[in-house]
Amino acid sequence: MANAIVLSGFLPPQHFTGNPLDRHSDLLKRFQATYNPDSEVSLIVVTGRDVVVRPVGPDSTPGVHQDLQALLLRTDDPELDLQGEQLLLKWTPSDGAESLPLPLYLLGLDVQERWTFAVDISPARDLFMDFLRTGCDLEVSLKDLRLLLPTLSLDAAAIAGQAVALSQWHQTHPFCSRCGQETVPTEGGSRRRCIGRQPHKLYPRTDPVVIMLVESPDGHRALLGRSAKSTPGMYTCLSGFIDPCEGIEEAVRREVMEEARVQVSDVQIVGTQPWPIGRYGSCELMIGCVARATSYEVLLNPAEMEDVQWYDRAELRAAVSFYNRPGPLPEIQKRSWSSLGFFIPPPFAVAHHLISAWASREDPWFTPADEDNASQGGTSQAAAAAGGSSRPSQNGNAAADDQQRHRDLDTAGEMQQRLPRLQEDVIRECSKAAAARAADASLRNAARGLAGSASWAEAVAAAATEATAAALRMMTLVEPVVTAISELHAAALQPPGPQAQMAADGRGRSESSRQALQGLQQLVAAIIRS
């Protein structure tokens, strides 16, 4: 298997990257060393994955409609406690009321040499928002960071992402996982420790996730899918968490096999994106990859995915282009869904940039499999010539023909072995309400595999016979698929002519056999497009 190749800087800057704050190590020591009671500190207001924002004026950057609402306080403000182990804003809701300790998390030093903190208002969420709106007369709102991404600048998104990641982590770790004791923030909010006699330290976690654009063996299609939890109509890159003691490229191959039963060879790492708004409240690191598939056939795993499909470049270019037009995000996605039957993730997700980068190319990402084979065949032929041996061939390339023949036979055998699994999958899916669509997708993807394998007409005929038998058992549900497979079956059984027979010693195919196979591939492609 090929090793992973890292192409740094290939993707454009991603949301949550490029944080403008100075976050170098020893932040707390540096803050304490530069403490000045006459200076100001900046507080970013968060609670979980929600952050406080304000509208911006008409002269702001195009596309930026909101900004973080920072609260500026003097360092010596009596409500600030910046000298203890736990940094706090001891906020008093009203006269005579008890103060509420709101935790502060040190984020970094901004470009104006002002220390920036996140203040977590989770203990007094509604009270504090009322205070900002009425007591401070601020036009602010508290919103989910994910919903804010289309309207925030990259700098604001990065700072908010850091604040939200810390807030969520602190909220979900109130107890020590080793001894069960209560934990408290320490070291400026970058750690927690338990209060036992032998305190343990807890560190914020980041969960690595692989997300991959899978290219077809011929380099002209990309594999996208959707799970049951996906936004209706959205197709995106396959993805999954990296298991313990697993390499990135290993995770890519495993996840694609688990979700689509497609084998992957080469893997390239092209960019990363931190994702502090993970589905389960965790901070994830999305590792963007492009992978090469070695097969076309998709066997849907309903436990993992709702649908998986191959898309060509023209379709994905059209899907990307919808985001180049102005308008609210839901309207853009609705137009794409109506026009194309699907839409892709928006530009604040790394999946969008993986799809865009692949679709914008004129040539395949990887060298197509047939060119690899030709290159290998040429090398073998040169080696044989250097050894002084030669074998007669109609086209003067006996070694390459022999290698291609064995590869074709291996592919044909592999396809025949996969057909029974395809039948089982189709029959199982047809017991559901969406049976017709699932069967159509599975069988057509099988046809794509046959079209790309250039296997023998006999192997195609056998595969088509088995597929037809499976389809006939559900005639009333998948009549269009039965028609397509039957046409494929009939075409495959046509006598190829006397010149299309393989020589007894199996040293090569005749030119007429090649033409017959090319015609069969064109027929399969026509069925796929129908």
Image: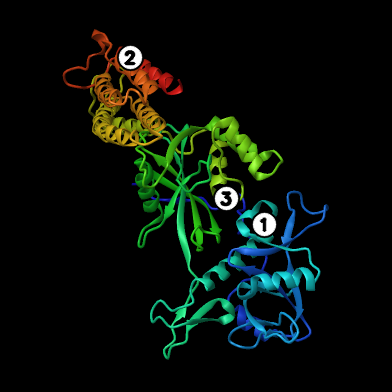
Mark 2 touches mark 3? (CB < 8 Å): no
Q: Which residue is mark 2?
A: 516
Tell me: 111 left or right of 402.
right
Mark 2–mark 3 distance (CA, rounded to whole Å)? 45 Å
Q: Residues within 10 Å of mark 2 (few under 14, many from 20)?
A: some
- In percent of the image, x 52 and y 59: which residue is there? 278
Closer-to-camera residue (358/505)? 358
Answer above or below: position of 259 versus 162.
above
Amino acid type at image mark 3 = Ala
**Residue 166 location, quadrant:** bottom right
In the rendered structure, which disc, 2 or 1, sits on the residue that comes first in sequence? 1
Q: Quadrant of the C terminus?
A: top left
Q: Which residue is mark 1?
A: 154
Amino acid type at image mark 1 = Leu
**Residue 43 location, quadrant:** bottom right
Tell me: 274 left or right of 81.
left
In the rendered structure, which disc, 1 or 3, sits on the residue that comes first in sequence? 1
Answer above or below: position of 478 versus 48.
above
Tell me: 487 left or right of 37.
left
* Residue placed furthest toward the bottom: 197
- In percent of the image, x 64 and y 43: which residue is there? 330
- In percent of the image, x 57 and y 50: which residue is there? 349
Amino acid type at image mark 2 = Ala
Give the image location of residue 314, x and y in percent: 55, 30
Between marks 2 and 3 in the image, the one whose residue lies nearer the viewer: 3
Q: Which residue is mark 3?
A: 349
Tell me: 29 left or right of 70.
left
Mark 2–mark 1 distance (CA, rounded to whole Å)? 56 Å
Can you see residue 348? yes
